[in-house]
């Protein structure tokens, strides 16, 4: 392993369908990066337990105590548990030490679903599963790129004056996109009119509330298509689409293929409890 650069110890996308917990009470021995993709959980963040929602990025340096508590929820007792999913990566190396020392990054930031971050993370996961020459060098470059991209995403995720409401709406959508949502319900979360919320959101993020909701649902659906063995009809239901036909139509419009073909071509298999 290239300890002088940046080495990836482990990287994956994990779907939890059963209760799960991880504890490093005496501190980690590596850098841990974790991006909540779906559902919510609880984590120890700077000595306090906090709720982690979709889009939340957690970064822990070595020696930092870490605890994660996942408890998948059921809307009704008879229904299957809603998946709780995340991207995670463990790494170490002198480049990472220097990068972390020179930055003042928070332990937790909501960065949403940044396309470049997701693409790099998926690339690392895919390359890490291969047995190939020069893998350490490849991982070094990819992890450096991911760290620098995360740094940019964290900066973009920090609120600017006057954008609090837009970020509040964004978080609400990310946390509830898998549920039936209307513009009225989204606006009610901020206790403002639909027109006012629509204006603030479009001004902050350059797209409509409804368009962003579809984006979040599609990103969640893509992860379940690629990383789970759930039936596609269940994926459509889990991610808030009105019907399976509607899900297939918008999925094909976004990714150029129907979900079944997309899974056959690009699926990584699945890892779950």
Image (cartoon, rainbow, N blue to C red):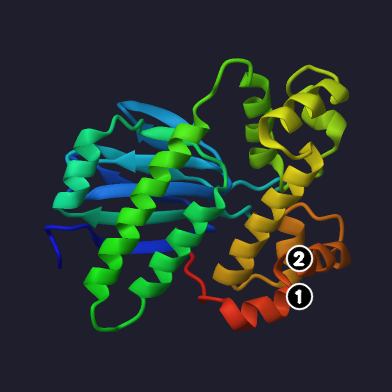
Q: In this view, does 199 lie to the left or right of 165?
A: right
Q: Nearer the viewer, residue 77 or 229?
A: 229
Label disc, if present, on residue 163 of the rendered structure: none
* Res. 137 visible in picture: yes
The answer to whether the residues at label 2 and label 1 have Cβ atoms under 8 Å apart is yes
Q: Is residue 229 left or right of residue 133?
A: right
Taking the spot 61% from the left edge, 82% from the top edge, the residue there is: 265
Dot 2, crowdedness within 10 Å: few (<14), some or many (≥20)?
A: many
Secondary structure state at the residue bearing disc 1: loop
Q: Which of 146 and 33 is in front in this view?
A: 146
**Which of pointers 2 and 1 lies earlier in the amino acid sequence?**
2
Name the spot of residue 228 as percent of width and height, x first. 57, 69
Q: In which quarter of the image is residue 264?
A: bottom right
Structural distance between the alpha carbons of marks 2 and 1: 6 Å
Of the 4 image quadrants, the one containing the N terminus is bottom left
Taking the spot 74% from the left edge, 64% from the top edge, the residue there is: 254
The residue singled out by tag 1 in the image is 258
Q: In this view, does 127 lie to the left or right of 206?
A: left
Taking the spot 25% from the left edge, 55% from the top edge, the residue there is: 91
Dot 1, crowdedness within 10 Å: few (<14), some or many (≥20)?
A: some
Taking the spot 51% from the left edge, 33% from the top edge, the residue there is: 157
The residue singled out by tag 2 in the image is 251
The relative height of residue 146 versus residue 205 in the rendered view (above or below) is: below
The relative height of residue 169 versus residue 78 in the rendered view (above or below) is: above
Q: In which quarter of the image is residue 199?
A: top right
Q: Nearer the viewer, residue 138 or 12?
A: 138
């Amino acid at each position: 392993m290239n300890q002088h650069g940046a080495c990836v110890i482990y990287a994956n996308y994990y779907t939890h369908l059963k209760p799960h917990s991880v504890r490093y009470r005496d501190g980690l021995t590596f850098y841990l990066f974790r991006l909540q993709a779906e559902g919510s959980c609880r984590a120890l963040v700077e000595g306090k337990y906090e709720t982690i929602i979709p889009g939340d990025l957690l970064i822990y340096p070595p020696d930092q105590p870490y605890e994660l508590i996942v408890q998948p929820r059921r809307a009704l007792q008879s229904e299957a548990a809603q998946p709780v999913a995340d991207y995670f990566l463990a790494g170490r190396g002198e480049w990472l030490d220097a990068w972390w020392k020179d930055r003042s990054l928070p332990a937790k930031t909501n960065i949403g679903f940044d396309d470049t971050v997701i693409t790099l993370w998926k690339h690392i996961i895919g390359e890490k599963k291969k047995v190939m020459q020069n893998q350490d060098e490849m991982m070094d470059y990819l992890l450096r790129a991911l760290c620098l991209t995360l740094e940019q995403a964290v900066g973009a995720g920090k609120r600017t004056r006057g954008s609090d409401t837009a970020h509040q709406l964004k978080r609400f959508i990310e946390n509830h996109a898998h549920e039936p949502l209307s513009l009225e319900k989204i606006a009610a979360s901020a206790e403002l009119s639909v027109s006012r919320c629509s204006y603030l959101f479009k001004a902050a993020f350059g797209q409509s509330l409804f368009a962003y909701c579809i984006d979040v649902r599609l990103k969640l659906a893509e992860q379940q298509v690629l990383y789970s063995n759930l039936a596609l009809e269940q994926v459509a239901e889990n991610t808030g689409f009105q019907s399976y036909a509607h899900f297939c139509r918008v999925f094909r419009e976004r990714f150029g293929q129907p979900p079944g073909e997309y899974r056959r071509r690009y699926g990584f298999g699945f890892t779950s409890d």
